[in-house]
Image (spheres, coloured by chain):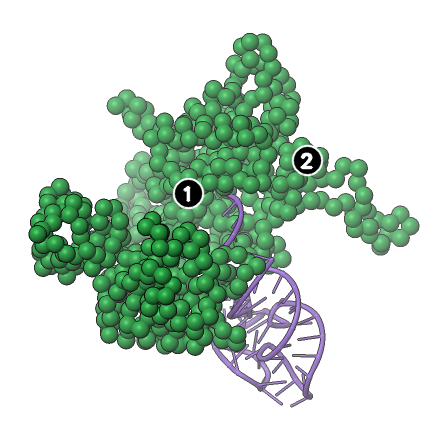
Amino acid sequence: MSISVSLPDGSAKELPEGSLVRDLAKAISPRLAKAAVVGVVNDQPVDVTHPLSDGDSVQIVTDKDPLALDTLRHSAAHLMAAAILQEVPGAQLTIGPTTDDGFYYDIHLPEGATLSESDFPRIEARMKSLAKAAAPFVRCEAETKDSEVYREYVAIDGGHNPFKQEIIEGLEANGAFSGNADAPQVSFYKTGDFVDLCRGPHVPSAKWLKHTKLMKIAGAYWRADASREQLVRVYGTAFFSAADLEAHLHLLEEAKKRDHRVLGEKLDLFHFVEDAPGFPFLHPKGTTVYNGLMDFMRAQLTRRDYHEVRTPLILPESTWHTSGHYDHYLENMFFTKRKLRDAAVPEKIIADAEEDRPMAVKPMNCPGHLMIYKHRMHSHKELPLRIAEMGQVHRREPSGVRHGMFRVQAFVQDDAHHFCTPDQIESEIGMLIDFFFEVYGVFGLDDIRLELSTRPEKSIGSDEVWERAESALEQALEGGGRTYQLNEGDGAFYGPKIDFHIRDSLGRTWQCGTIQVDFSMPDRFGLEYVGADGARHTPVMIHRACYGSLERFFGIITEHFAGAFPLWLAPEQVRVLPISEKFVDYANGVAKALRTQGLRARVDDSDERLGYKIRGATMHKVPYAIVVGAAEQEANTINVRCRDGEDLGATTVDEFVAQLPAFSVPRLISRLAETTQADAAQ
RNA sequence: GCUGGCGUAGCUCAACGGUAGAGCACCUGAUUUGUAAUCAGGGGGUUGCGGGUUCAAAUCCCAUCGCCAGCUCCA
């Protein structure tokens, strides 16, 4: 008897009955058999020891496939758990999943026990010897709690593990061990003496797990619930080869150098002070970059018929009651407190004096824009009306979540609100998605993930209104052919949203852009427009920001470019380096000529040697260093060197400027317009 | 906010119960320099802040603030 299975290329393979995935690989080629990590049978990942049935569609997965790496890391998590059990008596295992760049295992330590990074070498040594022992990963399925493997599993960390018990109870609630035909399978994997509950699959044996490394240790809670047991989370990573592991560690090292908090200090962009946590101080160079971002966005807004406004930083509390922020966002808001001097005793200060009209600092810009809309009657002919503001907002952030420029307590949003009719929602959102992609593209940020977030538990507005808003967003996404991820229950309290998550150079993703549909706020503020029918209607409002926070976006691009900003953003675009003090006058003339043409240029007139000046310019990531000495002065030329070390040789100021890429926002915008028009013409 | 780690000169770090130090940066002088560091000198610290233990605290203990990592939350 034989069976026939189909391969991804459409071909079929005849195999003897009882063949395993491994046998199929062997039948194709001995090399493939050696390289096979796991298989995918009928779209389900399985071990190479999985038996095949007639008609199965099978794929052999080797280390080239991301699934293989994920499997490897999952297996490494098991190996680490086994090593920790040996090393820390009384430790109890909970869960050990993989992450984007490794794995972790959450472990409950017995009273008094500790685990720190200083224990890593011992654990790693045990893992190494386990890998060397090369025990196979053996899958066992348990039909009942009486089965031998189940008893082994329970016993492995002392037999009284409440976390395991809770996991098993969860499985039982889903019908496990019931003996029913459709009961979920409960599988375990054994490696040597170690057993763990696991869906699988796993690598064939522990010998694959030679290139693992423990990374760090952190706290976590059982079920991510702060009221539950404190666990210790041990992070590790694993690769198929020593070279891959090496490359990964090298990447982390490089990423550390790109940290915007480090570069912010080194490049003199900004600083923080202890007494004002989360409030960045932008230095002149940082401000230049920041203004560049803002100018670029303003130009983009102009192209798309936005109207820029400015609204107060502080508004009466009553406004925040109307908007709902007081009820839903109170903890994150800053409130002003009136202070008075006692009339009789001037030294005595009444710290928290009563006020008829208490004030609050705005955490969002929308109420101000609603008030501008409301100032006069609008016709449907004016819609969509796009009101924009580079609006600074203040939000209280708990100490544990502040993080450099990425998460601050005062920041500017490139905020705007579109007031439109329900019919216009979809086209407005379609326009915005394209708009945002164009902006990110200018920075070379191309790895963007869209997320659609729906109604949260704490929210305002009727079911019907939410449904309409959610479907409008969905349709705009699908109409534009964009792929996205659904985030149930993650919307703002006033409406659903689309978020733009951008992957930075460290591989972390940051939420930048956001588009939120809001049927509630216009109603709360009593906004109206006169429709074609002559009747009054409530407009729909779309909240949107592209950078999100200017501060955060600044941080992101600082890391993305490793501080080497593109020419148009570079705080110092050209540094002129005279060979000696004899040529300082000539250098000043060159710098002045460059500044006249709109470039940010200065002269390094220190008494240092050229090598030192070159080094300074390079380390500050100045795009161009211009060397001038006797030869240049004589010929009225300049000698240009790029920050990457490339020598552009001798040229004149005019020629140099003429061949530069866009060095100002207007030039950038006009080039962008050219390419957009070219695209449209095609 | 929770858990853990860490706070020493502008920055990176040393000293780990016994007189706070180095490199870089900064300032001064000499030098006048041709593509990633010229030499010499100088200023700069109530060791985050507040208590405690001790003859003596940067060092040990407590508390607090900040930073870092993770969790949770978010632009």
Read off the chain for label 1.
Answer: A
Residue B67 horizontal side relative to residue A194, left or right: right
Q: Can you tell which of label 2 and label 1 is closer to the viewer?
A: 2
User: A135 or A664: nearer the eye?
Assistant: A135
Kindly identify which residue carries mark 2: A321
Residue A474 location (% of width, % of height): 42, 31
Disc 1 crowd rating (10 Å Cα; few below 14, some 14-19, many 20+) is some
Kindly identify which residue carries mark 1: A501
Hey, what amino acid is under mark 1?
His
Q: In the image, what residue occupies the spot 33% across and 49% down?
A: A182
**Pointer 2 or 1: first along the chain:** 2
Residue A467 location (% of width, % of height): 50, 29
- In the image, the chain rendered in green is A
The color chain B is rendered in: purple
Q: In the image, what residue occupies the spot 46% across and 49% down?
A: A555
Q: In the image, what residue occupies the spot 47% across and 60% down?
A: A166
